[in-house]
Amino acid sequence: MKVTAFENYITVEDYAPFNLGLSVDCGQSFRWKLKENNRWCAIVRGRYLEASENDGKLFLYTSENEFNELWRDYFDLDCNYGEICRTLCADEHLKKATTECAGIHILKQEPWEALCSFIISQNNNIPRIKGIIERLCEAFGDKTEYGFTFPTAQKLATLTVEDLAPLRSGFRAKYIIDAAQKVASGEVDFEKIKTEPIEFGRAELQKIKGVGAKVAECTLLYGFYKIEAFPVDVWVKRIMAELYPNGLPECTKGIEGIAQQYLFHWRRTCIE
């Protein structure tokens, strides 16, 4: 990987297969927006970034230090996705998915934001999810020069369901509050979820009201980078019924979450 620093931005070249637009807009994160100047922008872990991709180069409007501290890991640029995709290509459907949706990376998101976002995602569509999250940040996040940060569990734990009424999040409000209280108090132990085997995290997250297997798996994959997690929503149910009625192929073992992300986006966007 070659990183070159300029006055107001850096460029990244010779990185593993990576598609910025697909990675930030394939249903795993909900705060990225495409600006009129064709740059993607978001506030992540309290830091603002604008980024674009052109002619095999990433353009990140940040410093080299911040790239190494945050964005390099966030975009999972050091992971060998080329090798992962070669492994997945042992299956004919995954070969199509990884070819037609080439460059998707799992984003290493902040665990609380991932948990809260996927609670909001339940029985919801992506535009509405984004709207609720935007209103949540504007109401309870910290204001910065570029927008609002994602509110902490500690902040939301002090609120009531009624306080969340302006979000128009419906039945999800009580689950957001319960999640915030359990995370803020340590009853749901994020540090142990990070270090313990995935089964611990599955059980720990499902202590929260309204968090079932799908939300737990999403949180483990996108918030804790447990790449063996396998979220199953309506699209993945269709994929499994149509293509894998006897279960996932052996080539996905240990990387089921990455396989899922390719299959999910491929099934939604590439198959008639």
Image (cartoon, rainbow, N blue to C red):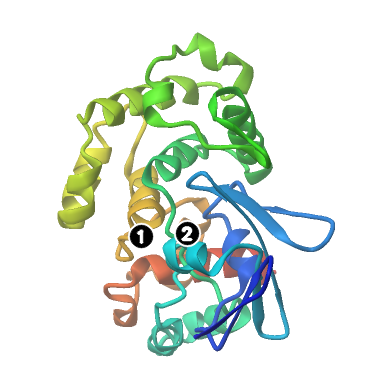
Residue 56 in percent (x, y) is at: 66, 85
Task: Residue 143: give its label.
Answer: none
| Residue 234 seen in the figure | yes
- Residue beneath label 1, please? 230
Q: Is 4 in front, or is 84? A: 4
Label 2 vs label 1, nearer the camera: 1
User: Which is more toward the observer, 253 or 11?
Assistant: 11
Other-residue count near label 2 (Cα within 10 Å), few / some / many at <14 / 14–19 / ≥20:
some
Per the model, the C-alpha gap separating discs 2 and 1 is: 9 Å
- Most extreme residue toward the front is 7
In the rendered image, the quadrant that contains the C terminus is bottom right
Residue at (21%, 48%) from the top-left corner?
Answer: 193
Instruction: Reply above or below: 18 against 115.
Output: below
Q: Tell me which corner region of the image, top left, top right, bottom left or bottom right, holds residue 78.
A: bottom left
Q: From the top left corner, tell me how far across and down residue 255 is, in percent.
A: 33, 72
Kind of residue at badge 1: Phe
Instruction: Give the mark nearest the N terminus, 2 or 1.
Output: 1
The image quarter in which residue 259 lies: bottom left
Crowding near the residue tagged with mark 1, few <14, some 14–19, many ≥20 C-alpha atoms within 10 Å: many
Would residue 253 be found to the left or right of residue 196 on screen? right
Q: Is residue 34 above or below residue 89?
A: above
Compared with residue 84, is residue 156 higher up or lower down, i.e. above or below? above
Q: Residue at x 66, y 68 (%)?
A: 9
Q: Where 216 falls versus 157 (above or below)?
A: below
**Number of numbered discs overlaid on the protein picture:** 2
* Disc 2 target residue: 236
Element at label 1: loop
Q: Which residue is drawn at 46% across and 42% down?
A: 118
Secondary structure beneath label 2: helix
Going by the numbered disc 2, the residue's amino acid type is Val
Where residue 5 appears, x then y in whole percent? 61, 76
Q: Do the residues bearing badges 2 and 1 touch, measured as CB atoms within 8 Å?
A: yes
